[in-house]
Amino acid sequence: MMDLQSILTLAREVNFKLTALADSKISEQDIVESISAYVDAFASWDQEDGLKAKEIDREMLQELATLHTKITEGAMQLKGDTGQRIKSLNIRRKGLLAYVDPLPKKISFRKPKKG
């Protein structure tokens, strides 16, 4: 069971890593793992305690909401970047295959229709 303070600590860590990614000081894999840990902890906290806890500091909730928004925006940015990289790799793959592999991609066993 995680409390709000530990969720905030995780969110601050992920937000720090997202800003470090902009400066290319950290790997994307490390950020994805941190985001995954944060999302799991947040979901667990939300399901168990969430806003039902009796002693919730309003300032902490506002900070969590701000950090959560930044984290989701950063995750969406990473998702978009990954899609662009996959497209560029597919283009390079096609070019390399055209150069290296002159064999046909499909083999048909049927005889073509005449007429």
Image: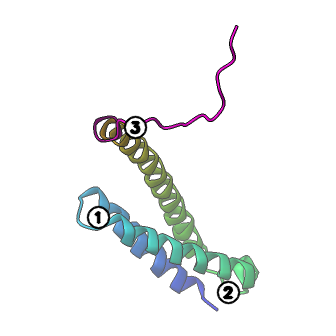
Q: Is residue 91 magenta?
A: no
Marks 3 and 2, Cα distance to the nearest angstrom?
69 Å
Query: The disc labelled 3 sits on which kind of residue?
Result: Leu
Assess whether mark 3 and mark 1 are in contact (beta carbons under 8 angstroms): no
Badge 3: residue crowd in 10 Å (few <14, some 14–19, many ≥20): few
Residue 64 image position (x, y, % from top left): 54, 70
The numbered mark at residue 48 is none
**In the figure, 98 relative to 48: above or below?**
above
Q: Earlier in the sequence, mark 1 or mark 3?
A: 1
The numbered mark at residue 103 is 3
* Residue at the spot of label 1: 20
Q: Is residue 107 magenta?
A: yes
Judge left or right: residue 77 versus residue 47: left
**In the figure, 53 relative to 110: above or below?**
below
Q: Earlier in the sequence, mark 3 or mark 2?
A: 2
Badge 1: residue crowd in 10 Å (few <14, some 14–19, many ≥20): some
Is label 2 in a helix, a strand or a loop? loop
Residue 99 position by quadrant: top left
Is label 3 in a helix, a strand or a loop? loop
Marks 1 and 3, Cα distance to the nearest angstrom?
46 Å
Residue at 54% x, 80% y is 7
Residue extending furthest right? 52
* Camera-side residue of 46 and 90: 90
Residue 28 position by quadrant: bottom left
Q: Which-is-in-front pick, marks 2 and 1? A: 1
Q: Main secondary structure of the magenta part?
A: loop
Residue at 40% x, 37% y is 103
- The magenta span reads 97-115
Residue 55 image position (x, y, % from top left): 67, 86
Is label 1 in a helix, a strand or a loop? helix
Judge left or right: residue 19 versus residue 40: left
* Residue at the spot of label 2: 55
